[in-house]
Each structure stands twice: as C-alpha cells, then as structure tokens.
Amino acid sequence: MVSLADKLFVLGCVLALTGLALGTPPTWSPYMAGALIGVLSWLSLYLVDKPIGTSTTYVRVSGMLARLFSPRSVDENEYMQETGIKVEWQMLLVFGVLLGGLVSALAAGTFGLRWVPEFWVATFGADVWLRMAVALIGGFLVGFGARWADGCTSGHGISGALQLAVVGWIGAICFFVGGIITAMLLYSGGGGAG
Amino acid sequence: MRTRGAATGELLVGLGIGLLFGLALHRSGVTNPDVIINQLLLRDMTVVKVMMSAVVVGGLGIYTLRHFGLVQLHIREASVGSTVIGGLIFGVGFALLGYCPGTAVAAVGEGRLDALFGGIIGMLIGALVYAMVHPRVREVLKMGSMGKQTLWGLLRVPPLVAMVAVSVIIGGLFWWFEVVGL
C-alpha cells in the first residue's frame, strides 16, 4: 500500500504538471495526449490500485438523484447496492475531468458556450431543440450501453485494452462498429464535415 | 480497516488524475464532437491515435511495473451477451451524441451545452434505467462468457511478449496513418 505522504507528493507533481501544461499550445499531438493518459494509468494502478474509468459514476450519481425522490427504490435495487451509491475515488476523478476541461479551455482561450456542434449543423441544421432531443437519446444509449457492457471508452477502450484484457479489445471494437455504422448512415452526406 | 487519511488521499489522487485526464482529452481535440464523428466516418484518426498511444505507453509501463510486483492487473469478464451487445448499443449512442462518458464531462468544462443537457442527463437516465432492468438481463449477460481473459492468456504467450507485440502492431498502424495522411 502506498503511503498518504507519497500520494500527496505525487498529487503535488500532478498539480505542477497541470500548471505547466496549461501554457502549452491549445492543440496537442494526439500521440502526446495519449501518452500522458498512459502515464496516468500507471499512477492510478500504482497509487490507488484502480484502473481509470468513468461510467460507473453515472450509476452512482443517478442513484443519488433518484434517492431524493424515492429512497426505497434505490436502496432495494440490487444493481445500485452492488455498485454502492457513495462518493468515492472515481467520482472525484470525473469531477477532476470536468475541472481539467474547464481550466484547459480557459487557458487555451477556447472556452465558449455552444449548443449545436458543427457536424450536426452540417447535416440536420442549427435547430437547438432537435439537437437536444437526439443528444438525449444518444446519451441514454451511451449510459445504458456502457452499463450493459460493464465499461465505456475509458474503462474498456483505454484501461481494459492497455491491460490486454479481452473485454477491453472486444468492447472497443464493438463501440466503433456500432458507431461507424450509425455515423455512416446518418452523416456521410454531411457537407462541411470533411 | 482503512484510516480516514488513506481514504482522503485516495480521493485526492482521483481528483488529480482526473484533472490531467480532462486536460489531455481537451488538448487532444477529442472533447470536440466533430472530431468524434469524423473518426466514426473514418476521415480522421485522432480518437484511435489517442487511445492506442495510451495503450502503448500505459500498457508497457503497467506490464513493467507488474513484472517487478508493484501493480496488479484488474481484468473484467468478457462475454458476448454483455460486451458485444452492450458495446453495440453504446456505439449507436456514441454516433448520435458525439461524446462518450469521459469526454462529455470535459466538453461541459469547455462550454458545450449539448454535452450537458443532452449527453450527461441522457447518460444518467440510461444508467438508472439499466439499474432497473439489470435483474432481467442477467441471463443474457452470461451468454458466451470468456471469463477474465487476457490476450496473452488466449494466445498462451508471456505477458511482456504480448505487450511488446501489441505495441509494434500499433506502431505500424501509426506509421501507416502518417504515410496516407489520416
């Protein structure tokens, strides 16, 4: 077990690194960004013995929100109980991702409130409500599918694949197969995207 | 029984790793859903480059650390019923949304509101509905189970050999991307 002092030391290094990284160009080489994520995977396994993941946090947060309306149904739900509806390591990681995206965008000068992404405008136009409705359906399938598959692009696609887990590689391939077929059907006629 | 200090240390490590993870996702461009969709249309390989670079650097490091007994692996179970079906459902949503559970959060930090009101709200509802149907799909999840299998276990080669081989293949893929300009 890694001691608390060691964890705090590494955390200090991470913060220093973040400060340094904020001053770098707004767009990184994808290879360099991926390499940094690889280093983070060492740190998470070494320091807290947990692989990086994000989608379990959606179960916990949805459980916490559902508890506000119907505490019993959450407490009696087997899956919620197996997952454990509490604040833990991964939830802080996801909160860190939010902060990381925010400070990175502010420092790079790319922060801006936007409703409809360009790929969507190119195919379906700039209607905000249509985009929100489809994003909601897409989000539903992502959240539902991630739990069905027991992992998402980070838990399977990165952490699983880098541990050479069969589940990671099959998962990542299926995410892309489903995604590529759907994208080809929907957007391949989109003008501005290429 | 762990002390409160150890638990706090764990949470702080999560926050720190998340901070740099979010920064790397944002600066690599994958928080932009246009990049995700162009990847799914096979016009731009940014997402694959980020993921596979993480696999090479992360995997070589993890397997080296493991060789010296400093980390242990966490391999989850693979099955057709869970991994393939769930993965395909995820993929359809991924193309409709343009974000995954990690990039959506960093994209909200960047100011993308469709990642919040469409994406994250939808994912929370999806996770909640999954929790409700889980007992009824349990039998489906077990279909075609492969257990907690690894690539090296499957191929019956030493772990480090498999990791180096995977890295060489990914290196070749990257070389090809650069040659053809993807």
Image (cartoon, rainbow, N blue to C red):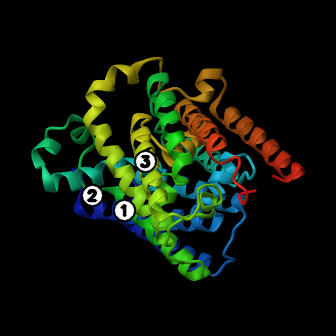
For disc 2, the marked residue is A87
- The amino acid type of the residue labelled 3 equals Ile
Task: Confirm or deny contact between disc 3 and disc 1 (CB under 8 A).
Answer: no
The mark nearer the N terminus, 1 or 2, is 2
Q: Chain of mark 1?
A: A
For disc 3, the marked residue is A137
User: Callout 1: helix, strand or loop?
Assistant: helix
- Real-space Cα distance between discs 3 and 1? 26 Å
For disc 1, the marked residue is A92
Viewed as shown, does residue B117 lie left or right of B168?
Answer: left
- Real-space Cα distance between discs 1 and 2? 8 Å
Farthest-out residue, right: B179
Residue at image coords 47%, 27%: B148
Q: Quadrant of the C terminus of chain A?
A: bottom right
Q: Chain of mark 2?
A: A
Res. A110 image quadrant: bottom right
